[in-house]
Every structure is written in structure tokens, then in C-alpha cells.
Image (cartoon, rainbow, N blue to C red):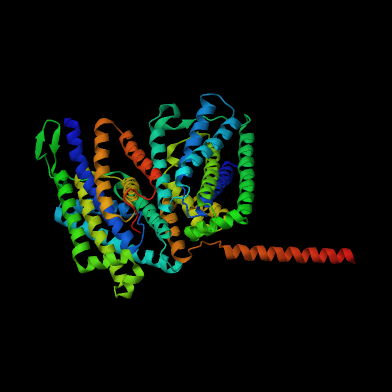
Amino acid sequence: MPLPLYYFLSITAVNILMSWALYLPYRMAHLHFLVVANMAISGYTAAFMVLSLQLPFWLALLTGFLLGAIIGFVVAQFIGDAPTFAVVIVGFTFIYITRTVIENTEAVGGTMGLFGLPNIGGDPAVHRWTILAILYGLVLLVGFLIHRFDHSQLGRSASAAFIDRDLTTSLGIDIKKLGILLQTFSCMLAGGCGVLYGFIYKSFHLDYFTFHVVGILMTIIFVGGYKTLWGTVLAAPILYGGPLLFPPEIASWRIVIYGALLIFVLVLKPEGFITTRFVYRVEALLSRKGTKQSLSTNSQEDV
Amino acid sequence: MEVFIAQVINGISLGSIYVLLVTGFNLLLLVAMIIHFAYPQVVVLSMYIIWLVLGYTGNNLIIGALAGVASSILLNLISAPLFQKVMEKRGEVDINSTMVVSMGMGMIITDVLSHGFNKGHPIAFPDTLAGGDAIVRVGLISILPGQVYAFGVGVVAVSAFFWLLYKTRPGRAFRAIAEDPSGARLVGIPLLKTGLQSYALSGVLGGLIALLLAALLGSASSALGEQVAIKVIAVSIIAGLGNLIGGLVVGLSLGIVEAVVQGYISGTWSNVIAFVIMLVVILAKPNGLFGLKI
């Protein structure tokens, strides 16, 4: 597989997963940027385990997921039902603290970063296919789980909490528990993504875990559509891949383009390009087609 | 002890700027009903405009200061229709959406500053802006003109703002909208006009802050806006969103704590300690120490 294609596919998958990590808590209006800090914490921890302690990749990956979940769970005890702006600022503060701690810790490479992560399975081709298999396996699994969540009572509770928390509480829904659940899951996912991200490039550098990442993820969610998981699937490859096709002098302004797009969409199309109504229509169309097909198959069998 | 006193003096001047920033931020929150996350970025952009104008005019401070204030007012007024449009589309006051729009603005401003000015390098202001040598120097303790300006202008600006808010007719309109927008509309207060006035007023404050920050820090970089933005919103949350008195107390306290920590711990760690303190308070009291006012 050509390297540019590999990088495009793998980073797109990471962006989809990370955007979903942000999408889930936002179902109840929590913009949980702690996921970006978690990505860095788990990623660097896993890299340290592999490089310094010579532990296997799979154990490091598992640790990444677990560490993310633990941090998410602990923080969620305090902000599980906090107002949106408090959740936002906790996330930003964590990013800043994490970056500074890593910058000043020589054991994880400080400002230079960590290099020389080994190939999974020894061979570079095996490494790439393994990474892609894990990432797209995760995309399918997490996508399925989120789809089930969106169509469940919990998903409806989150939608209700997004609109009116007081009313949701009066209906007997425990908003804090719901917040803890969503924040823990999204942080766990971000932890795993952090480890995988490092193994894609076989190195870690703090330049990735900046406020720019927050901007890119926010643009993916809000431009794609923040009320359905499909918006992210559409927006992630376009928004990441689009600037790669631009000439370098335009591509270097991609953050400005993302910012302008984010504002443009929020002003003109607040729900994003893929709306819930659009998804319901497609689902209805598909189910009608499915019904027609099964009816015609049955009638043929009858004949 | 000398270090402590010197750092408290530094902290008071830094805290005065935080107070001004939080006041401008809270004004927009209470009257225009937006969380203007990019307000500190607007301030930093104004610092860059001041730097640019100083360069072109041979360090003419008056023109530089006027350009800073004008650019801040203009940027705030330009962003007003965007926020209004978002709220119109939603058919309700939605401060979360305005916060995301504002974050988008912040992304644009930060990237423009990191590409479009001084080839992305940090900028340095002329010494004349800081006012030259120390006014008072006793051992380690020194009082610089920049610190005096920051504190003096901070006190005057905040006093004038509170006078405007509590003693004048437009101030009553601001408070009425902050208290009950529907009620304010019923008694004939023009929401749009008053909202625009709040954008302009916070723009004036923003320009002043840009000037004071330039005098106090002597330099600026594109990343400054993000760092200050986090602090300002953290201060605002710790105080209780929209709580003007709380913002005054917490802003000043943060400036002093930050400066004192910097006196004893070197490098970037001192900033981390300030952030950790803010984080602990926010985690313990997400609705603020002085209570929400929105």
C-alpha cells in the first residue's frame, strides 16, 4: 500500500474515532476536550512502556484504553453534570497542564518527543495492515455501539438533557450518571486513539496535541452534523483529505479555512450537513426498499 | 520577603488586567448573551495592530493606542451580526453555540497572527511603551511605569464601568437585559441597540487591555491569546459566570497568586500551578464561588 494512502486512511480513522469521542458527551451538551489531553497522556504512557520497559504493543494499547477510562471516570465524578462552559474549560486546562508536564519530563522526551517506536509484527507492511485493521475494526465496533446508543432509551435521555436538563431530571433521569458514562467511554476511546496515533507515525511529538486539534475535531463534528454519528464519517475524510490536495501555500492556512467553515456552517446550517431528518429519510428509504425486496422475494418464492 | 513583596506588586498589575478582561467578557455575557471565548484573542490581535501602527508611525504612542482601541471596537462590532444570526437561527438564546462560533473566530485570529505578522515570530514592543526605567527601586522591589499604568488604568476603567452600570441610564438598560431580556423588551429597552453598545464598550475595554498588556509584557505571540482565553474563562467560571464583583476579586487574586508562584518556581511550571489551582476550584465548584448571574 502506498504510504500517503496509508497515512490518509489511518489518520482519517483516528479523526473519526476522536470526533466520536467528542460527539458522545456532546449528546448532552458537554464539549469534553479532556479527550485530547487523554490522547496525549495514554499515548505517551504507552510509548514509554514499549520503548523503556520493552513491554508488548498489545499490553500498551490495553493500558492506553484503561488509563483513558480511569482519568475520564475520575474527572467525570466532578463534572458529570456540570454546565457546558465548565466542562470546556476543564478540558482546555487539562490540555495545557498535560503539555507542560510532558514538555518538562525528560523520561518521555520533553520537547523533542519520543522516536523509534517498533513495528508491530516486525515487518513494516504487517505493521501498517495491523494498524489499519485495528483502527477500522474500532470504527465499526464504536460506530455500531453509538448507533445502538442513539436508538436507545439512554440516547433519548441524552437528547432530552441536551435540550432541558431540569425537565430531564424531573423525568427521573440521573444526568450525572449519564454524564459519567458518556465521558468515561469517550475518554477510554481517546486513550486508545492516542496509542494508535503514536504507532501510525512511530513517534510522538507534542505539536499534535495542541488547540489546533481541538479546532479540527470541532469542525468535523459541527460541519458534518453534531446530532448524528454519520456527519463525522462524512466530514472527517473530506476535511482532513481536502487540504492535502491544495497547493502548499493554501494548505498552510487550513486552520483559517476550518475556522471560517465552522462559523459559516453554524450561522447558516446550525445542525451541520448531515441532519437527523436526513438520516431518518435515508433509513426510511432503505427500510422501504428492504421491505419491497423481501416482499418481491417472498412473492417469487410463492410463485 | 523582598521577593514576595516584589511579586505581589507584579501580581496586582497583572491582576488588574485580568479584572479588565473578565469585566469585558462578563459584559458581553450578560448583555449580548454570548460566551465570547475569542475575546482575549481579539485583544491580542489589537496588540499586533498597535505594534504594526507603532512601526509605521515611528513609535507614535497616541496613534498606536487609538489604532488598538479602534481595531478592538471594530472586531467586536463585526462579530456581533454573526452571534445574532446564530441565535436567530436557533430561535432562542443559545450561549453554547455562540461559544463554538467564538472558538472558530479564535482559531482564525490565532492562525492569522502565526502566519501573517512578523513571519510568525513573536513581536516586541518599543521600550517607550513600557515607560522606561523603574519609578521606585528598593532592593529587589521595583515599581515599573508599565505596572503603574496597568493598575491605574485598571482601577479607573473598572470604576468608570461600574459607575456606568449602576449610575447611568444605559447602565440600567444593560442590567435590565442581564436580569430579564423579555421584561426589558416589554418596558421599551431596544435589545439590539443595547447589545451593540455592549459590543462597542467591551471593544473599548479590549483596546485598553491590549495597550496595557503591551506595556506590561513588552512582547506578544500568537499563542498568548489562547493562554489568556483559558485564564479569563477560568476566572469567570471560578467567580461565577456573569458575576462582576466575583470577577474583580478572583481576577486580582489570580494575578497575585500567579506572580507569587513565578517568584519561587521557575519556567513554565509556575503557569501549571496556576492552572492546577484553577482546575481544582472548577472541579470542586463548577458553578463558581460567588454564584452564577446568568
Q: Is residue B48 visible?
A: no
Outermost residue on the top side: it is A53
| Residue B165 versus residue B269 in the image, above or below | below
Left or right of A226? Residue A253 is: left
The residue at the point 34 percent across, 42 percent down is: B278
Q: Is residue B284 above or below residue A27?
A: above
State the residue in front, A96 or B285: B285
User: Residue A129: x and y, percent?
Assistant: 64, 39
x and y percentages locating residue B265 in the rendered image: 28, 31
Image label count: 0
The reply, left or right, for residue A170 in relation to residue B247 is right
Left or right position of B58 against B77: left
Residue B244 or residue B269, whichever sits in front: B244
Decide: is A67 above or below A136. Answer: above
Classify the position of the N terminus of chain A by image quarter: top right
Q: Position of residue A68 (x, y in %)?
A: 52, 38
- Residue A55 in sight in this render: yes
Instruction: Tell which of A5 and A264 is nearer to you.
Output: A264
| Quarter of the view holding residue B242 | bottom left
Q: Nearer the viewer, residue B220 or A277?
A: A277
Which residue is rendered at x = 17% and y = 58% of the image? Answer: B160
